[in-house]
Image (tube, rainbow, N blue to C red):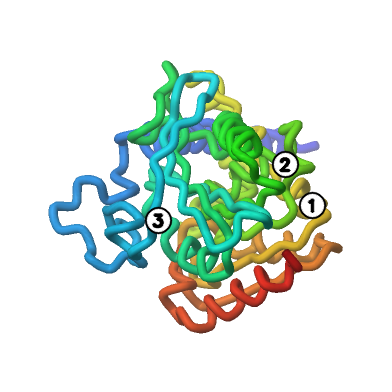
């Protein structure tokens, strides 16, 4: 081989390696900003003028103030200490109870859209907090880990509701909350107590979420850079985000699934839900909209209520 050809090939390899290394470090730095609690005001906690509509993300107020629903503030014990939740009873306590899990940096109030539908269907509902939330303990290595650690807090909440008398559980999760649900299905001894899932824009593949953000900027080798960034981040932050993939667990879940996702989602790519639907064999209700992240309800509230309400009523409680 001509020495100049060899030099060109070696030069290309060096450039690619340096590009991946630099891209991996840059991606990990961005992840550190986004995944460290307080780095981004995900919930709008610092918004001096929060919305007054309880169905808008960022609304703040308890279920009685928001929807006129009586509730009880309850506590359950996680491995890190006590966490707080709101329990909203329903007309019948005999059927499955629901647990709502909010997304990254979110708050319990984010669940009022789902709560209103669950309550109308006669399903008692618990809106939980988990590690790094206000009202829940914060670990020493404070990070949002897309379910890899947070599932244990959901596990504690499920156990508390079963002890309280829940005959079975419906898990409702949005965005990173969906990832927490997926990790729970993978790891919890109580996974067989779950009879149905209701997910909105679930982030079931963290690597795909990162790669999608890189690819959207027309940067080449998006998946490679995502893996490199996650590797660097996991190494220096002592995290395990390489394990934040639970799509297969949700795909294999034998019970019925309600799923909503918007094609304009700029945070969690709709391709994750499309892969999930293609892999499912159990009953699946898929509401695909044109909305951005977690705005499928807002795009058409009547349609969302009809689809999710019909799904809940089909469970045969």
Relative to 140, 259 lies left or right: right
Image x and y of residue 200, in percent: 56, 61
Indicate whether 285 appears above or below 27: below
Residue located 38% across and 56% down the image: 70
- Residue at which label 2 appears: 185
Total residue callouts: 3
- Point out the residue furthest to the left here: 48
Above or below 258: residue 31: above
The residue identified by callout 1 is 253
Q: How far apart are marks 1 and 2 (CA)?
A: 8 Å
Q: Residues within 10 Å of mark 2 (few under 14, many from 20)?
A: many
Q: In this view, does 86 lie to the left or right of 172?
A: left
Label 3 environment density (alpha carbons within 10 Å; few <14, some 14–19, many ≥20): many
Q: What element carries label 1?
A: loop
Q: Quadrant of the N terminus?
A: top right
Q: From the viewer's perspective, is 5 left or right of 53?
A: right
* Residue 28 screen position, x and y as percent: 47, 33
Q: Which mark is residue 110?
A: 3
Sequence-wise, the earlier of marks 1 and 2 is: 2
Cα distance between the residues tagged 3 and 2: 22 Å
Q: In which quarter of the image is the C terminus?
A: bottom right
* Residue located 23% across and 63% down the image: 51
Mark 1 touches mark 2? (CB < 8 Å): yes
Measured as percent of width and height from the top left, residue 47 is found at 19, 52
x 71%, y 47%: residue:
167
Let me know if residue 15 appears in the view: no
């Amino acid at each position: 081989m001509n020495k100049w050809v060899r030099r060109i090939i070696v030069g290309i390899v060096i450039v690619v390696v340096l590009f991946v290394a630099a891209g991996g470090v840059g991606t990990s730095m961005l992840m550190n900003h986004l995944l460290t609690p307080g780095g981004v005001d995900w919930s709008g906690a610092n918004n001096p003028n929060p919305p007054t509509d309880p169905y808008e993300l960022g609304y703040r107020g308890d279920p009685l103030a928001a929807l006129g629903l009586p509730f009880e503030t309850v506590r359950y014990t996680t491995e890190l200490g006590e966490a707080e939740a709101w329990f909203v009873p329903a007309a019948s306590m005999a059927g499955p109870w629901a647990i709502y899990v909010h997304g990254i940096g979110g708050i319990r109030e984010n669940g009022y859209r789902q709560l209103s539908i669950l309550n109308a269907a006669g399903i008692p509902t618990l809106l939980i907090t988990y590690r790094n939330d206000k009202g829940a303990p914060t670990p020493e290595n404070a990070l949002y880990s897309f379910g890899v650690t947070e599932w244990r807090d959901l596990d504690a909440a499920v156990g508390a509701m079963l002890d309280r008398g829940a005959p079975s559980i419906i898990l409702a999760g949005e965005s990173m909350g969906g990832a927490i649900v997926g990790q729970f299905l993978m790891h919890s001894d109580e996974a067989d107590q779950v009879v149905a899932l209701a997910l909105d824009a679930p982030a079931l593949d963290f690597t795909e979420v990162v790669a999608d953000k890189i690819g959207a900027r027309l940067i080449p080798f998006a998946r490679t850079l995502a893996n490199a960034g996650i590797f660097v981040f996991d190494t220096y932050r002592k995290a395990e985000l390489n394990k934040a993939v639970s799509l297969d667990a949700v795909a294999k879940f034998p019970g019925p699934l309600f799923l909503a996702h918007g094609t304009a989602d700029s945070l969690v790519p709709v391709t994750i839900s499309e892969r999930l639907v293609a892999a499912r064999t159990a009953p699946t209700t898929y509401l695909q909209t044109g909305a951005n992240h977690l705005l499928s309800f807002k795009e058409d509230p009547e349609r969302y209520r009809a689809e999710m309400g019909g799904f809940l009523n089909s469970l045969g409680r």
